[in-house]
């Protein structure tokens, strides 16, 4: 089997993922009852989805704004190619306001999603980010409003239909 075939999910997988996304505290037994399949089937499917990395966690989703971080921004970084990504990545990982970072193609090298308590606090976070000697330049875009929150369920449904 190819990696693409291994990554496929079926309708039952999609329904299982959707149920756990909607009710993360649901038990396997209740899940099997609602889906109309055996408890062992649900457990086996969950184990398979976890082993394949399809399901990555069952943890709570936290709203940064609800805990005082109402400013979201995206920062592109140009890094010194001589110093590489590893030390920059370690630096970014040590800053709590950096929610995610990705290496990218194009004129910049890294894209980060960051949060701050205010615009003034955003300046502090950016200053902290660019304090690393491996970061040559940063460009920041402040998000005004979230139009579509991070989501994967529509993708899961689409993948199950193929």
Image (spheres, rainbow, N blue to C red):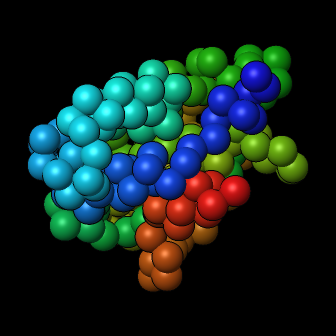
Q: Depth check: give the residue in front, 29 or 38.
A: 38
Q: Depth check: give the residue in front, 81 or 147.
A: 147
Quarter of the image for the C terminus: give it: bottom right
**Residue at x 55%, y 48% (from the top left corner):** 10
Q: Depth check: give the residue in front, 131 or 148.
A: 148
Q: In the rendered image, is residue 94 in sight? A: no
**Residue at x 17%, y 51% (from the top left corner):** 33
**Image coords of residue 59 (percent x, y):** 24, 42
Compared with 86, 4 (above or below) is below
- Snapshot quadrant of residue 80: top right
How many numbered badges does the structure rendering display? 0
**Image coords of residue 16 (percent x, y):** 35, 50
- Snapshot quadrant of residue 1: top right
Residue 117 is left or right of residue 31, and the answer is: right
Compared with 82, 104 (above or below) is below
Compared with 71, 125 (above or below) is above
**Residue at x 62%, y 55% (from the top left corner):** 159
Q: In the rendered image, is residue 13 in sight? A: yes
**Image coords of residue 115 (percent x, y):** 39, 57
Q: Depth check: give the residue in front, 121 or 25.
A: 25
**Residue at x 68%, y 23% (from the top left corner):** 85
């Amino acid at each position: 089997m190819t990696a693409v075939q291994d990554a496929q999910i079926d309708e039952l997988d999609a329904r299982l993922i959707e149920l756990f996304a909607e009710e993360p505290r649901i038990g396997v037994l209740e899940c099997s009852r609602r889906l109309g399949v055996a408890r062992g089937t649900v457990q086996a499917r969950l184990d398979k989805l976890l082993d394949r990395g399809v399901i990555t966690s069952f943890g709570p989703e936290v709203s940064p704004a609800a805990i005082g971080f109402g400013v979201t921004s995206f920062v592109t970084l140009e890094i010194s190619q001589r110093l590489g990504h590893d030390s920059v990545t370690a630096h970014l990982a040590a800053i709590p306001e950096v929610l995610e970072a990705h290496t990218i193609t194009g004129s910049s090298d890294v894209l980060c999603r960051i949060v701050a308590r205010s615009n003034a606090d955003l300046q502090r976070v950016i200053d902290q980010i660019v304090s690393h000697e491996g970061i040559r330049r940063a460009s920041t875009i402040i998000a005004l409003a979230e139009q579509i929150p991070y989501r994967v369920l529509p993708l899961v449904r689409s993948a199950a239909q193929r």
